[in-house]
Image: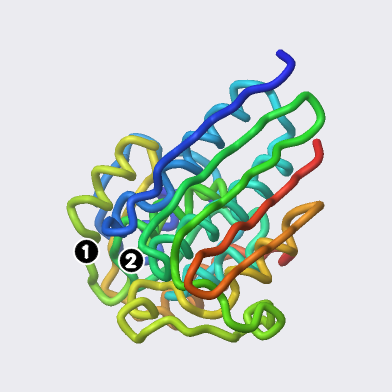
Amino acid sequence: MTIEQVAQILNAEFVCCEENKHNEVHSACGSDMMSDVLAYVKDQSVLITGLCNPQVVRTAEMMDMVCIVFVRGKRPSDEAIALAQQKGLVMMTTQHRMFSACGLLYSAGLIAGESC
Amino acid sequence: MEHLHLEYDVDGNNFVSAGQATENVKFCLKGLGVNPQDIRRIAIAMYEGEINMVIHANGGKAIADIYLDKIVVQLIDSGEGIANIEQAMQPGFSTATEDIRSLGFGAGMGLPNMKKYTDDFAIESTLGVGTKITLTVKF
């Protein structure tokens, strides 16, 4: 699916880099622990998280992810937004909680992907 | 290109800037056309090291040497050192505070991750002196 479809499914609002919404994504990972993302994730393109600091962007960047979804209506810090803009990383925020957001995307066909 | 030498100061008082050295190294490796999987392996390992230096050791130095067939990264700090390296290498063991966990780190995966993603991992630490970690990824 496209990033735009992710936003539609989650009724999410784009925070930055909406211009990249036509990019394709196939798999996702949900976590508030960046250490776990770095430890277990491989080739996932969407990060679903409730953590809002700039290290979320850096973690996504290290893992070559292209989109971050913030759950529970959270908004990333200005520093995090600035960093994501530099990298063209799409950010969006949804009112859904982590479990619902993951479930909705999974039901719509986004997979967990291979873990390391 | 025979050898590219890069040095960075990692600011121990700035959690926001942690990871900048890794970003720069990643950018260089991309420019050199290194295999993306190898770039990701060293990026994860170096980033974990940078974060560790910021949260545990008040910063330090990150040195990257890029050769035709490998990258060697040294992470050197003057922090308090690691009392029991074997224990610190156990997945899940962490001395991080709740504050650090609330930032998304301190799950006790840093050192195990560095070992997991690299072809060679070496750690030397002396209490009261500091820690030196050497990471090697072969291309």
State whether residue B62 is above or below residue A56.
above
Which residue is located at x 66 percent, y 64 percent? B124
Which residue is located at x 72 percent, y 43 percent? B37
On what subunit does the disc labeled 1 rest?
A
Visible residue check, residue A2:
no
- Disc 2 is placed on an element classified as strand
Assess disc 1: are there few (<14), some (14-19) or many (≥20) residues with their C-alpha within 10 Å of its C-alpha.
Answer: many
Visible residue check, residue A54:
yes
- Disc 1 is placed on an element classified as loop
Q: Amino acid at mark 1?
A: Arg
Q: Give me the disc on residue A42.
A: none
Q: Earlier in the sequence, mark 2 or mark 1?
A: 2
Q: Amino acid at mark 2?
A: Phe
Tell me residue A69's x, y (percent). Answer: 38, 62
Which residue is located at x 52 percent, y 80 percent? B107
- According to the picture, the residue beneath numbered tag 2 turns out to be A70
Q: Are marks 2 and 1 in contact (CB under 8 Å)?
A: yes
Foreground residue among B67 and A57: B67
On what subunit does the disc labeled 2 rest?
A
Residue A48: quarter of image: bottom left
Tell me residue B122's x, y (percent). Answer: 73, 59
State whether residue A8 is above or below residue A48.
above
- According to the picture, the residue beneath numbered tag 1 turns out to be A75
